[in-house]
Amino acid sequence: MKDIAWKLSILGDAAKYDASCASSGSTGRGTAAAPGGVGSAAPSGICHAWGTDGRCISLLKVLLTNVCVYDCAYCINRRSNDVPRVSFSVTELVDLTIGFYRRNYIEGLFLSSGIAGDPDHTMARMLAVVKNLRSERGFNGYIHVKAIPGASARLIQETGYYADRMSVNIELPSEESLRILAPEKSRSSVLGPMALMDDLSLSGGGKRLPSPYRIDERAPDMVRDYPVPYRPSRSAHPFIPAGQSTQMIVGASPESDSRIIRLAEGLYRRFGLKRVYYSAYIPVNCDPRLPGAGKPPLKREHRLYQADWLLRFYRFRAEELFSGDRGNLEEDLDPKTAWALANYGLYPVDMRKADYDTLLRVPGIGVISARRIMDARRAGGLNFDALKKTGVVMKRAKFFITCGGRAYEPFPDNPLVLRNLLTDAPLPTLPGRSSQLELPF
């Protein structure tokens, strides 16, 4: 058992750099005087994810092995690094998962791996783990499995019938950066499994809205490289019912936010991904191909998530979030507020008349509050007190709305003044003036 605990400490810690779970890399709130404690997120192996209903799910997040034949510049497990190399056997990992589940430590498994031997060998061992859990141990908890780039279509397909979700990390936003930082990987080896999983999901009864969008990163031969072995019958187990996701590293390569978000939009449109995760680059290796040591760009990661949210739920297009030749999102303003200021001529919006799409583009109004506003208007009159009850964040929304032609309070009609009110930044000095702008109220 001591040997298993040692392996878990190494392979659980090595898995923390995958951003697909929200507590990845968290140090928790423990101190030297009181380490650990109830709810600590720091111990290796346990992470937290969230279901579509908002419920927190605890997962055993671990690598099958940290042995890897690849030498990706940004990865702690690359073959040129001098780190302890360990592997779980199939039986060890199955027993560990079942033991944790029975003790109510976890509700599921997040399984990834380094590439030991070759992609097919690694994918076959991961398949053996999930197949054993489902078929022999009767495990009905949540399972998320990483698809190994370059593995055969048959192995990926069979694994998908035992997993709830699968993902293959695109890692870097361009083929050029992939060639420089991860030379053993190719765009077809990454996008091929995505195309395969999307095709199998659709053949199992899923739906995809027709779209003219395509991503320029798509290899023209990837479907040929990953042919669908067969289309399962309707009676077969569903293929990855929770869909697929991917991850991009932010800050390890020079691509702009615009390129990252446009690529994410293409992935959502073409492959029906449930989520694209953005991982702020953490320097774990010394390599001349990588940026110098510094703090992870967490603010940038946060803004990318906000922009991603606008794509998925607020009906924005990537091109709308980057006006002119600006390639990066603003740090001082969230993307929605930045867009509203750049299009300030569209405001204020009357809450009693605006349609649903217009409501979604008002800072401080979310999807739920927009729906509540529509319902409240059908039920009767709408005023500012009723808006607050719908969940509208008036601190931001008050500058962009009226209700029956009345403003919540006087607000400036100068976007420069408004920008500073929303960012709490020092007021700018305009050309020809020796003092800062004066507020109109």
Image: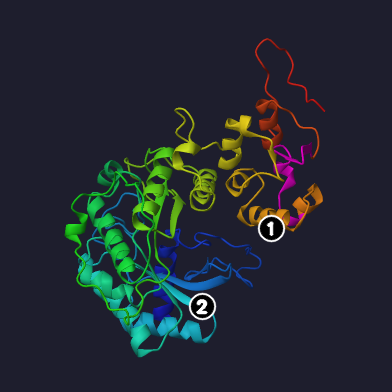
Where residue 411 sits in the image (x, y, percent)?
A: 76, 32
Give above or below for 108 relative to 400. Answer: below
Q: Quadrant of the N terminus?
A: bottom left
Quarter residue 293 falls in = top left
Looking at the image, can residue 268 be seen? yes
Q: Earlier in the sequence, mark 1 or mark 2?
A: 2
- Tell me which amino acid carries mark 2: Ile
Give above or below for 50 relative to 192. Answer: below
> Disc 1 on helix, strand or loop?
helix
Residue at image mark 2: 106
Q: Please say whether residue 406 is one of the residues in the magenta stretch.
A: yes
Where residue 137 sits in the image (x, y, percent)?
A: 38, 89
Q: Residues within 10 Å of mark 1 (few under 14, many from 20)?
A: few
Quarter residue 434 falls in = top right
Left or right placement of residue 39 versus residue 201 in this view: right
Q: Which of pointers 1 and 2 indicates the residue nearer the eye?
A: 1
Q: Residue at x 61, y 68 (%)?
A: 35
Give above or below for 172 relative to 321. Answer: below
| Disc number for residue 375 | 1
> Disc 2 on helix, strand or loop?
loop
Which portion, as a residue range, is magenta?
A: 389-407
- Tell me which amino acid carries mark 1: Asp
Give above or below for 240 relative to 274. Answer: below
| Disc number for residue 66 | none
